[in-house]
Image (cartoon, rainbow, N blue to C red):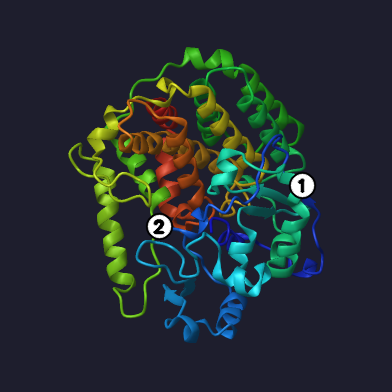
Amino acid sequence: MPWQNSWRRILPYPDCVSISLPVLPLATPGQRYSCHGCGNCCRDFTVQLRPEDSQRIRQQAWETRIGTNPIVVFRGQEYLRQLPDGACIFLLDDGRCRIHSEFGSETKPVACQMFPYMLAPSETASQMGVSFACQSVVENKGKQYNEQVSDALKIVLRGIPEVVRPARSAAISRSRRAEAGELEAIKSRLVRWIQRDAPLHQRLDGLAWIAQTLSVAQLNKVRGSRFKELVDLLFDALADELPLHPIGSAIPRQNALFQGSVFARTEDPKPVAQGAPGRFLSTISQLRRNRLWRRGIADTVVPPIGIGWPTTATFGHVAQVNRVRESSQLTACDELISRWMRSSIEGGRIWGSGYYGWNAVDGLSAFVLSAATVGWLARLHAVGSKAHAPSLANVQAAVGRIDRTAGRAVWLGGWSERMRLAYLVRDDGLRRLVASQF
């Protein structure tokens, strides 16, 4: 599940392990969620098991009952076995979980119980969030999200108590930590900008401009009230500044790095049974796919994304699909993307413990790059429906696919992603890429 590896990036204070942090509800108004039993989270999703999960499954004697070990080991970690079509081995024909059906919801792996809830702890509180990898969340169906916080907390306190223990708050940049109120100052202005009454592509351009500006700013001596003044100044001037800084098309190097970012955000190594090709061969295979993505040759078929995605679309086909701004359902697409962005920011999922322990400046840059990737994936998905521009369904698929890896794909928190961003924040790289998709 998308949240399950993020806890590895949490840095708790050893002398505070007995403290239970207050949980802040998700502030995004109108966000809804109820499980509708679609079963999508049990198809094509890899579920990593905690030691307690594995022990409980073994005690349920599934290997004897179903004739195969439901647990596979992949790269030193244990996962639930998946069938050849990507479905979890415990998924029943009617969409229910067999473990849940026979032993109760509390006996399922914690990752399955928790999804799509997410928690990002800091020094003073744990922020509740939600994953848009869930179809009901994407479609905004069900009860008000915060009405169900108590249910999520029961799961957390029973199965993953470390996410309600103190953790170091995010830094502002790589060279300095955040002071009181600084992270909140950035967050509140980001949300206000997202809510601005302006075309979607202009708001995304503004986010890219802010990310680039902060990435090159000397912030070490700008602290406290002066830092808040700087943030306010940048955002207040943003609407007037953007027209004064027109951009051209992305250069080949920027496009190649962007295609690499799409690969990184959609790559999903599958757990394999013992005896299948090991880590070395699977790594070589990943490097080959990465090369295909980075080259992006027009007549090359886009490597597989997942269930429900085009299997014969070429990079050239994607290039022929119009940008999101040309969608006949632009208003609905705007609502979804704005809700996803706001929920990610307010849910603590773009920096700190919610995103590989990253600082705010780098986390914002990565988030803008993910937004651009949503646009490209929506165009890819549109190829499958032979549309000239992305529809709401295409954008829903793209947002859901991107949020599957957010906080979960460890390589997105590594040096290759940092190097990619270090290049793209220069020469208006992020702005050019956002404009090319939206």
Question: In the orientation shown, which residue stands out farthest toward the left?
Answer: 299
- The percent position of residue 206, horizontal first and vertical second, equals 54, 24
Identify which residue is drawn at 44% across, 27% down: 431
170, above or below 19, in the image: above
Tell me the amino acid under the disc marked 2.
Asp
Identify which residue is drawn at 35% across, 45% down: 309
Marks 2 and 1, Cα distance to the nearest angstrom? 32 Å
The label number, if any, that marks residue 147 in the structure image: 1
Q: Is residue 140 left or right of residue 147?
A: left
Q: Is residue 42 left or right of residue 121?
A: left
**Mark 2 or mark 1, earlier in chain:** 1
- Is 101 or 77 nearer to us in this picture? 101
Q: Is residue 275 left or right of residue 169?
A: left
- The percent position of residue 327, horizontal first and vertical second, equals 42, 23
Labels in figure, total: 2
> Mark 2: which secondary structure?
loop
Instruction: Decide: few, some or many residues near mark 1? Use Cα within 10 Å; few <14, some 14-19, many ≥20.
Output: few
- The percent position of residue 82, horizontal first and vertical second, equals 42, 68
Residue 154 in sight: yes
177, above or below 369, in the image: below
- Is 399 or 181 nearer to us in this picture? 399
Which residue in the protein does label 2 denote? 268
Q: Quadrant of residue 220?
A: top right
Quadrant of the frame with the C terminus = top left
The label number, if any, that marks residue 361 in the structure image: none
416, above or below 195, in the image: below
Identify which residue is drawn at 61% across, 17% down: 197
